[in-house]
Image: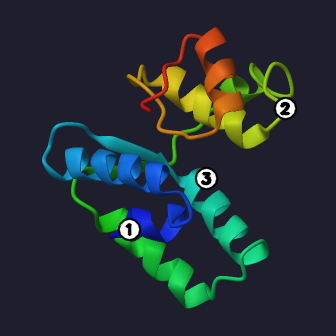
């Protein structure tokens, strides 16, 4: 399964990710993946884990075609700059929050506890 590829080292996270993807597959939720998140995933897998490009491409392709998952490329720079570099030091985190707020998404699926605390202060819930 796709989620195993990304969080195989943490069983609890893998189970939570699997539950999220199954909920999307069953039509219980829609998982929105901003395009820049796919770039970030590709960068980390390549740069830090040395995952072959073909494997990364296969994972991105699987994400794009997974039932209940939609990708979006709507990311207003002005909204991002409302949250970066303060209160969010990571431009990627600021973009994730900006997309969630701009589109009134129910929550953001992240295991990053620091981001979860900061999102909560901005009125964005964590899925997990």
Q: Earlier in the sequence, mark 3 or mark 2?
A: 3
Q: Secondary structure at mark 2?
A: loop
The C terminus, quarter of image:
top left
Residue of label 2: 89
Residue at 54% x, 89% y is 54
Question: What residue is drawn where x is 63% and y is 32%?
Answer: 76
12 sits left or right of 93 in the view: left
Q: Earlier in the sequence, mark 3 or mark 1?
A: 1
Q: Is residue 50 left or right of residue 120?
A: right
Q: Are marks 3 and 1 in contact (CB under 8 Å)?
A: no
Q: Nearer the viewer, mark 3 or mark 2?
A: 2
Circle 3 Cα neighbour tier, 10 Å, few/some/many (<14 / 14–19 / ≥20)? some
- Local crowd at mark 2 within 10 Å, few (<14), some, or many (≥20)? few
Q: CA distance from mark 3 to mark 1?
A: 18 Å
| Kind of element beneath mark 1 | helix
Nearest the eye: 120 or 40: 120
Q: CA distance from mark 3 to mark 2?
A: 17 Å
Q: Which mark is residue 41?
A: none
Mark positioned earlier in the residue sequence (1 or 2)? 1
Picture layout, residue 41 above or below residue 12:
below
Relative height, residue 57 to residue 87 (above, below): below
Q: Quadrant of the N terminus?
A: bottom left
Nearest to the eye among marks 1 and 2: give it: 1
Viewer-side residue, 9 vs 37: 9
Which residue in the structure is indicated by mark 3?
36
Circle 1 Cα neighbour tier, 10 Å, few/some/many (<14 / 14–19 / ≥20)? some
Q: Position of residue 119 (x, y in %)?
A: 62, 20
The residue depicted at 36 percent of the width and 71 percent of the height is: 62
Q: Nearer the viewer, residue 84 or 76?
A: 84
Distance in Å between CA atoms under marks 1 and 2: 29 Å
Please give the residue where the numbered disc 1 appears in the rendered image: 2
User: Of all residues shown, which one is farthest toward the front?
Assistant: 11
């Amino acid at each position: 399964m796709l989620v195993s590829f990304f969080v195989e080292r943490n069983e609890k996270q893998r189970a939570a990710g699997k539950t999220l993807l199954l909920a999307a597959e069953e039509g219980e939720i829609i998982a929105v993946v901003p395009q820049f998140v796919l770039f970030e995933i590709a960068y980390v897998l390549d740069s830090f884990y040395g995952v072959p490009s073909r494997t990364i491409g296969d994972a991105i392709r699987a994400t794009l075609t997974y039932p209940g998952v939609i990708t979006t490329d709507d990311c207003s720079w002005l909204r991002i700059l409302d949250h970066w570099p303060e209160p969010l030091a990571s431009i990627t985190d600021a973009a994730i929050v900006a997309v969630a707020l701009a589109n009134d998404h129910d929550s953001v699926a992240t295991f990053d506890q620091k981001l979860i605390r900061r999102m909560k202060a901005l009125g964005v819930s964590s899925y997990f």
